[in-house]
Image: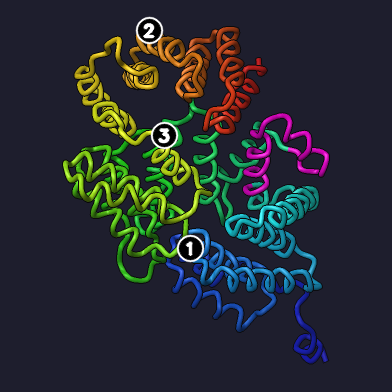
Amino acid sequence: MCLYLFLSFPSQAASVYSPAVRQAYEATISLRIPEGRRLVQQELIGNPDNAAALLVANQQDFLTWAIQQNPEVSDGILARQEKRYQRLSSLKENSVWVSYALAEVRLQIALSKLLQGNKLGAAWDLRQAYLQYSANARLYPDFLPNRKTLGALQVLIGSVPDSYRVLLNIIGMQGSIETGMTNLKAAATKSNPFREEAQLLLALLQHLVDPEANDLAAESVLKLSRQSPDNLLFSFAAMHVLKKTRESDLALQVYLVRPQQPGYLAFPYLHHMAADLYLYKGDFSNSIRSNHLFLSQHKGDNYLKAANYKLYLAHWLGGQSQQAEKHLALIAQQGKTKMEEDAYAERFIKEQPNPNRYLMLARLQYDGGYYEEALQVMSQISLTPETSPAERAEYYYRKARINHGMHNLPQAKRNYEQAIAASQHTSLYFAPYAALQLGYLYQDEQKPQLARQWYTKALAYKGHPYKNSIDGKAKLALQTLKKP
């Protein structure tokens, strides 16, 4: 009779992070998506109500869409995600894995909608996901995977400007950088199934919200990629942070040793990143080759303008004027302007048709962290009474950034102030950026009053193309100044 009852009724807890699910997750987070799909489908055949397996299956669809952004498959991917969410919602099982999977899948649906341009739908799903994470934290306070994503959301919400955060608080989405980092650090330092994922998120968010933590963030992602050389997602994260922190040679090393064998999800954007890194280095032929490789593999509408802009620069700086003009024309013809890179490329063809070669070279070399070379190029520029205000302002701004990167801080401060003076009565972005950087410098020197003055000045500039970005950084910096 006991055997009959055992066989007749399903177990109360069908959801478990089994060895099969763990293997599927590890393949998925490494971007070995075909292998991950095979493993998770085997688990779901035997246990179709395993919320942990459904979560990993959904993550596979989300990563495929987020990385490739192929509009031809986006509707199908979103439909499958919605179906999984309904399946999870219908489960009678009350367990931490069901509750956590509901939050994660809802968040992935929100991000998928955002990538499609459905901001309203994404906002609604994001709110529902956040409320689910918050409820999970009350019911299962020691479940570290929930603290991983809840912490990331708390940091992101806590870093938005005060005016927007008030609205988020009203609809029940309260953020705090300090609380979020505490949750993330717990998930990143204590044993749990998604510890490495938490370490990755921690490094990315440190880089995003705290300029002083850039070196630590770069070190963390580089360590992750070296510890898991078969993980393509970690390679991307390392390239991203190293590129942003102007460690171009290290970023290129990561690109060249990334896993490339069959079985990985195609990741065209890596070639676009590599094209930038080669451009900074002055290796124009490899930059051109990498961007053409990107364009031949990429199926989406984003980054097309940016790729053609970088192809224009590589051909122009390499002395191939005919090819340069071809790609300059393609900037206007191809792609969209949803991404900042694309929007910049579109503005370039309208505002800067005849750039100064030396200023452009110096800018690219600075972006790559090649400060000595950039300073040498700058020495070839002579300012005259006929020099335009825009070119004069950019000259001082570029010199400031280079000296800042070389830790020649007194000279950097002088150049930033010269850039601000040269930008008077214009809508050039050099002045607000210079003010922001002066704020960072004085904050590093433990001079909060001076730092506050410069951050406030950065906020006061209007009508420039980076208003939202600079204001967000200045407001975030002002928040950190409030701390003792």
User: What amino acid is found at the position of numbered circle 2 in the picture?
Assistant: Pro
Does 5 appear above or below 440?
below
By secondary structure, the bulk of the magenta-drawn segment is best described as helix
Q: Residues within 10 Å of mark 3 (few under 14, many from 20)?
A: few
Between label 3 and label 1, give the one nearer the viewer: 3
Residue that numbered label 3 is attached to: 351
Can residue 226 be seen in this snapshot? no
Residue placed at 47% from the left, 59% from the top?
Answer: 301
Task: Give how far apart the Cα atoms at labels 1 and 2 are.
Answer: 49 Å
The picture quadrant where one finds residue 62 is bottom right
Task: Give the structural element (helix, strand or loop) at label 1.
Answer: helix
Does 255 appear above or below 166?
below
The picture quadrant where one finds residue 9 is bottom right
| Residue with the most extreme left position | 319
Mark 2 in CB contact with mark 3 (< 8 angstroms): no
User: What amino acid is found at the position of numbered circle 3 in the picture?
Assistant: Glu
Q: Earlier in the sequence, mark 3 or mark 1?
A: 1
Q: Earlier in the sequence, mark 1 or mark 2?
A: 1
Residue placed at 51% from the left, 21% from the top?
Answer: 432
* Residue 330 coordinates in the image, percent (x, y): 35, 53
Does 443 appear above or below 364?
above
Please give the range of residues in magenta: 148-174
Residue that numbered label 1 is attached to: 26
Q: Residues within 10 Å of mark 1 (few under 14, many from 20)?
A: some
| Residue with the most extreme front position | 386
Can residue 13 be seen in this snapshot? yes
Q: Earlier in the sequence, mark 2 or mark 3?
A: 3
Quadrant where the C terminus is found in the figure: top right
Residue placed at 16% from the left, 41% from the top?
Answer: 319
Task: Give how far apart the Cα atoms at labels 3 and 1 are.
Answer: 47 Å
